[in-house]
């Protein structure tokens, strides 16, 4: 398998060739053995849960409906400032939107910013994260109720439509 992958990457993705490394798996004959070895199945399963824990202790809850995707930011046991939690949540929220391939209208309920400077810092973080997305992302700013409004134009169906969730 190593030789096959190395040959394929040399033709289609030469920048990945130096990153390929052989490993020995105890149960290499089992389907998805490498996925289990790297706990990729657990990471994939996490994409179908409505919540995601942030490294610093906060969390985000992602709810998708036919009309929009909403993300709620919670501080949890995080002792950092609201701005620090919001920045971490913004980075992870936009990452989750890319991974889940969510599209349409997205509303994010961040923790309350103390002042305009914090809101501007948060907006700059969101703009930087949106620039990493290959899809068209438009940031519409804060609504009158304090929600961040974003639209994302995806090019393919969302993850939950592309995978048979029952097999996980």
Image (cartoon, grey):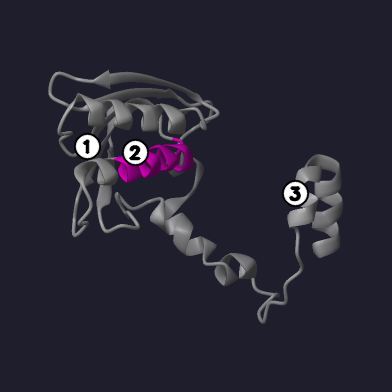
Label 3 neighbourhood size at 10 Å, few (<14), some (14-19), many (20+)?
Answer: few
From this viewpoint, which residue is outermost toward the front? 117
Q: Magenta segment: does it hold 140?
A: no
Q: Position of residue 39 (x, y in %)?
A: 52, 67
Q: Position of residue 128 (x, y in %)?
A: 45, 30
Q: Magenta segment: does it hold 98?
A: yes
Q: Residue tagged by mark 1?
A: 110
- Please state, as top left, top right, bottom left or bottom right, where the N terminus lies in the image: bottom right
Residue 16 bears which disc, if any? 3
What residue is drawn where x is 37% and y is 31%? Answer: 126
When asked about the image quadrant of residue 26, the answer is bottom right
Spatial separation of the CA atoms under disc 3 and disc 2: 29 Å
Residue 19 bears which disc, if any? none
Q: Are marks 2 and 1 in contact (CB under 8 Å)?
A: yes
When asked about the image quadrant of residue 160, the answer is top left
Q: Nearer the viewer, residue 168 or 78?
A: 78
């Amino acid at each position: 398998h190593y030789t096959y992958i190395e040959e394929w990457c040399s033709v289609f993705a030469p920048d990945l060739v130096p990153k390929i490394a052989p490993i020995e798996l105890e149960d290499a004959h089992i389907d998805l053995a490498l996925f289990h070895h790297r706990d990729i199945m657990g990471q994939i399963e996490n994409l179908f849960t409505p919540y995601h824990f942030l490294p610093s202790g906060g969390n985000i809850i992602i709810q998708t409906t036919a009309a929009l995707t909403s993300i709620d930011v919670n501080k949890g046991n995080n002792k950092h400032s609201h701005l620090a939690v919001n920045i971490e949540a913004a980075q992870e929220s936009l990452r989750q939107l890319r991974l889940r391939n969510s599209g349409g209208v997205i509303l994010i309920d961040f923790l309350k910013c103390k002042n305009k400077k914090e809101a501007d810092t948060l907006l700059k973080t969101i703009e930087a994260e949106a620039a990493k997305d290959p899809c068209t992302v438009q940031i519409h700013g804060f609504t009158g109720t304090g929600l961040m409004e974003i639209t994302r134009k995806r090019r393919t169906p969302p993850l939950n439509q592309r995978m048979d969730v029952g097999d996980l």
